[in-house]
Amino acid sequence: MRQVLAIPVPCGLGGPDPNVARGPNVLAVAGLLEGIPDAGWDAALEAPAGPRLESLGSLCRSLADRVSAAIIQGSLPLVVGGDHSIAAGTWRGVGRALGSPPGLVWLDAHLDAHTMATTPSGNPHGMPLAALLGLGAPELTGVPGPILDPHHVCVIGARSFEKSEPALLLGLGVRVFNMDEIHSRGLGSVFAEALAIVGPDFGLSIDVDVINPLEASGVDTPVPDGVFASELLLLLRGLGRLPGCRAIELCEYDPARDSDGGTAAIVKSLVLSLFEAGV
Ligand SMILES: [Mn+2]
């Protein structure tokens, strides 16, 4: 198995709750990498001071460099956020290392497909997927064009979004599996289709708010309903060991809303499952 390089990105600039920035440290203390052979923490990557979008853009540029370097040296980057705006840096770095756009499974209660023109909140953590597809805030990805190929991107678990977001994603050809479809087909069937869509070289962007807040309430923006951790855990099992899995990202864990550590424990079990043998 490749070395797993966990890259902590203590950033809360993209969302409403700055406590998300404490996520990587709290997860590290909770033993996020315990039980994963040959895994270690990189130094934390901090956002420089400055206006929000510029600061995030600079952070994403540094993150892209780190992720790209990790892949080139044969490691598997595990990016630990932090709010989801950092995805603009993670997948830019993966694309650069591969020389082609990776497929991407985006697990999220939201669609993160706002542009500066459509966002009601102005929060960049609602924009990274649009930015990665070449629409929205180029400050985040640092490049004007698309980084991902929409035909190899899918979103699983969506249940809270504004009308412009599915319009943008579906218009580009992104497959969106919302919770209604998951309830009617089952998560297993949806997940299998998602892996076929993303193709052999792919990544996983896991927004912890994809999980039902009845189980995992420790997230920045909880939304009722969602997938159950036990089911997701089975489907993620061993994916991190596949050579085609190029990077994994965990975002939006909010320790301030996780007083009993229950959400941290769930996140830890998901990561362990990703690296379990016996797929
Ligand atoms: Mn998200």
Image (tube, grey):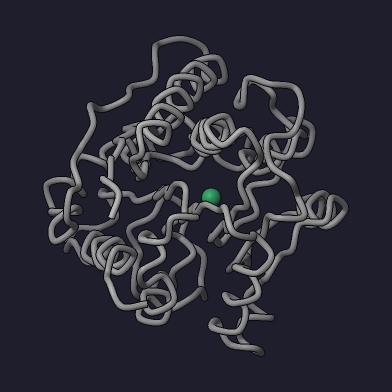
Rendered-image quadrant of the C terminus: bottom left
Q: Position of residue 277 (x, y in %)?
A: 27, 72
Q: Position of residue 85 (x, y in %)?
A: 52, 36
Viewer-proximal residue, 152 or 121? 152
Viewer-proximal residue, 197 or 171? 197
Residue at horizontal 13%, vertical 53%?
Answer: 31
Viewer-proximal residue, 160 or 238? 238
Left/right placement of residue 18 relative to residue 102 reads left
* Residue ranking furthest to the right: 171
Residue at horizontal 70%, vertical 55%?
Answer: 152
Residue at horizontal 88%, vertical 53%?
Answer: 171
Q: Does 50 sit above or below residue 263?
A: above
Where on the picture, by quarter, is residue 28?
top left
Q: Position of residue 139 (x, y in %)?
A: 64, 20
Q: Position of residue 259 (x, y in %)?
A: 19, 58
Left/right placement of residue 42 relative to residue 123 reads left
Left/right placement of residue 21 relative to residue 265 reads right
Number of marks in picture: 0
Rendered-image quadrant of the N terminus: bottom left
Left/right placement of residue 191 relative to residue 150 reads left
